[in-house]
Image (cartoon, rainbow, N blue to C red):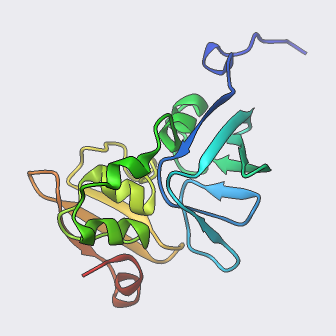
């Protein structure tokens, strides 16, 4: 057995911050795909979080005194520290909601997308798009899923604001604030 030194990126794994976005959990596991599934509850953006360390394709977290894992299931082009820092941010994102139009605040609070949102606001509402399907965050469209067979595609205009969301009618009712 060959022992390897710890990766420099993982040398200091513990830090505290806030969830960047609304994420769904079963109480033990949060996946980067952020599926809406039976038995899952929403952890709202701004929830205080402590990163405890890293495991195989997961970030160990403490949320409200309980241990949970954030799974890097579909964004494995990011190393675990990059992945952790995408989802656990140093400043409370709820402060960014102040001054936004009520419609955009309502969309974020209800985990939905509406026209006129920025990329950051879409991420706050429904999570970051997974890198396996969205390698470039500046792309004109982001592919998300409500669950395995329920894709929705968020389209951005040249100004970087949401222009439309394409999906089936049932998913649209769940993810779009018209």
Please tell me whether residue 86 is drawn above or below residue 168 in the rendered image.
Answer: above
In the rendered image, which quarter contains the C terminus? bottom left
Left or right, 166 with reference to 33: left
| Residue nearest the viewer, comparing 101 with 33 | 101
Please tell me whether residue 90 is drawn above or below residue 170 in the rendered image.
Answer: above
Which residue corresponds to the image point at 65% horizontal and 56% vertical from the top-left? 30
Residue 18: image location, x then y, percent: 55, 44
Left or right, 68 with reference to 173: right
In the rendered image, which quarter contains the N terminus? top right
Residue 65 appears anywhere in the view? yes
| Residue nearest the viewer, comparing 61 with 90 | 90
Which residue corresponds to the image point at 54% horizontal and 50% vertical from the top-left? 74
Which residue corresponds to the image point at 75% horizontal and 63% vertical from the top-left? 27
Which residue corresponds to the image point at 48% horizontal and 39% vertical from the top-left? 86
Residue 42: image location, x then y, percent: 59, 67
* Outermost residue, right side: 1
* Outermost residue, left side: 158
Please tell me whether residue 175 is drawn above or below residue 45 in the rendered image.
Answer: below
Residue 72 appears anywhere in the view? no
Using the rendered view, name the quadrant where residue 170 is placed.
Answer: bottom left
Residue 62: image location, x then y, percent: 73, 44
The number of discs equals: 0
Residue 103: image location, x then y, percent: 25, 72
């Amino acid at each position: 057995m060959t022992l390897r030194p710890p990766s420099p990126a993982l040398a200091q794994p513990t830090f505290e911050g806030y969830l960047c976005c609304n994420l769904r959990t079963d109480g033990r596991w949060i996946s980067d795909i952020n599926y809406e599934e039976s038995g899952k509850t929403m952890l709202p953006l701004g929830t205080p979080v402590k990163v405890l360390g890293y495991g195989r394709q997961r970030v160990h977290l403490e949320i409200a005194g309980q241990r949970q894992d954030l799974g890097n299931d579909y964004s494995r082009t990011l190393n675990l520290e990059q992945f952790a820092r995408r989802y656990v941010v140093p400043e409370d994102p709820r402060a960014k909601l102040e001054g936004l139009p009520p419609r955009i605040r309502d969309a974020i609070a209800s985990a939905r997308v509406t026209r006129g949102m920025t990329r950051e606001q879409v991420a706050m509402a429904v999570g970051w798009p997974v890198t396996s399907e969205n390698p470039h965050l500046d792309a004109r469209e982001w592919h998300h899923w409500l669950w395995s067979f329920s894709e929705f595609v968020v389209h951005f205009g040249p100004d970087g604001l949401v222009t439309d969301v394409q999906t089936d009618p049932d998913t649209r009712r769940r993810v779009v604030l018209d």
